[in-house]
Image (tube, grey):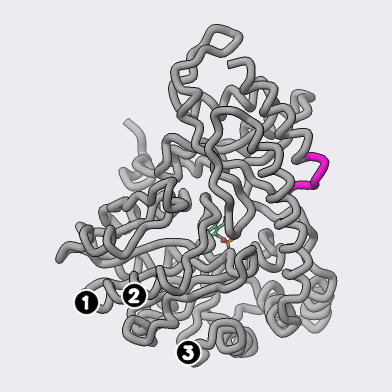
Amino acid sequence: TSPLSDRVQAMNESATIAMAKKCRELIAKGFDVINLSFGEPDFQTPQYIKDAAKKALDDGYTFYTPVPGIPELRQAICDKFKRDNQLEYLPTQIVVSTGAKQSLANAVLSLVNPGDEVIVFSPYWVSYEEMVKLAEGTTVPLVGTLENDYKVTAEQLEAAITERTKLVMYSSPCNPTGSVFSREELGAIAAVLARHPHVYALADEIYEYINFVGEHVSLAQFPEVKDRVITVNGFSKGYAMTGWRLGYLAARPDIASACDKMQSQITSGTCSIAQRAGVAALNGGRASADEMVAAYRRRRDLVLDIVKDIPGLKTPIPSGAFYIFPEVSAFFGRTAPGGSTINNATDLAMYLLNDALVSAVSGEAFGAPDCIRFSTAAADEKLVEAFRRVKESLAKL
Ligand code: PLP
């Protein structure tokens, strides 16, 4: 029998990381694979942020920091919330972590008891479900429809809340769909939450800056629910800082303290040098992000222009983030040139990896088994070549 805990045995490997691994294996064998499976900006971190990290190292910032983050960074995050989101937080309400991923895990582990229900707007980011599992909660997926750009409605939420509901989780802009909630839609969701004071919300705003619609709305902006909203954000996407492992949350003081305690026993907080870089990033504003967003928008349009001519793909226009998430069920039941049958999105993603040498991720892990996710965070010419190959391979089915 295995010495491993039930907990880890019940956990799924991250589907995006698994796909990236397969992709690297093929590349190592000499295949020219275009990797569109990873949710990672292909940009370098802006130079002014790198310079701040170099200076931090030279200035000797090599010691443990306060667990919830250095005071300058927590203040810079409060300033950011005020500037970008018109939200007032005290530095004591901010907890800086090893990526937004840890912020989400801290919040879930600090709020969810065994048996609690966590409503997750679906399609959702792969890790939400596994975090809830770790907390021994029950994920209740609420599925948005293609016709509504996969956005869950306030009516759906109202119908799903029970007395066991503890938490609602969503991302906007959404990974994987690219959907962005409007003020009206989130206001209606806030009104539902206001009627259910035992329910908390975890708003994942990591793609805030990568928004082609313009207005980013935070759930915490609705005063009737602000106290029950935990807002998560970070540096990975907007500042192209994935490898630095820097994210944060803002919450009511008791919830922030719980997250601080949780992380004090697990990581003692994140890297001192990354935190100093984070201060520079935020205080430098969002000009660097705006440049990247212009590129993401151009690429989105480039890809949508190719994809619209591929029969069988139903692709909503993403309002933010850097993915397209076509519905692909038209291909289910078809036979590939080698004789195998495409039964589901996972089979199709595998077929595209082997035949088109393009790696994408099956929607299965995002709670959307009829879809596949392609990242559009790659150079323009790579995207053009990738979707040319995808089109050719799909035509053989
Ligand atoms: N939330 C969503 C929706 C994401 O897509 C990601 C990264 O892919 C994260 C959180 C985690 O970001 P970080 O790199 O800050 O841990």
| Ligand 1 positioned in quadrant | bottom right
**Residue 255 position within the rendered picture, expressed as x and y whole percent measured from the top left:** 36, 80
Q: Secondary structure at mark 3?
A: helix
Q: Can you tell which of label 3 and label 1 is closer to the viewer?
A: 1
Q: Which residue is mark 1?
A: 195
Q: Residues within 10 Å of mark 1 (few under 14, many from 20)?
A: few
Using the numbered discs, state the Cα–Cα distance from disc 3 to disc 1 in whole angstroms.
28 Å
**Residue 346 position within the rendered picture, expressed as x and y whole percent measured from the top left:** 49, 29
**Residue 336 position within the rendered picture, expressed as x and y whole percent measured from the top left:** 56, 13
Q: Which residue is mark 2?
A: 190
Work out whether mark 2 precedes mark 1 in sequence or the reverse, and give the earlier one: 2
Which quadrant of the figure contains the N terminus? top left
Work out whether mark 3 precedes mark 1 in sequence or the reverse, and give the earlier one: 3
At 55% from the left edge and 33% from the top edge, which residue is drawn? 313
At 67% from the left edge and 53% from the top edge, which residue is drawn? 40
> Mark 2 belongs to which amino acid?
Ala
Q: Secondary structure at mark 2?
A: helix
The numbered dot on residue 338 is none
**Residue 305 position within the rendered picture, expressed as x and y whole percent measured from the top left:** 70, 42
> Mark 1 belongs to which amino acid?
Arg
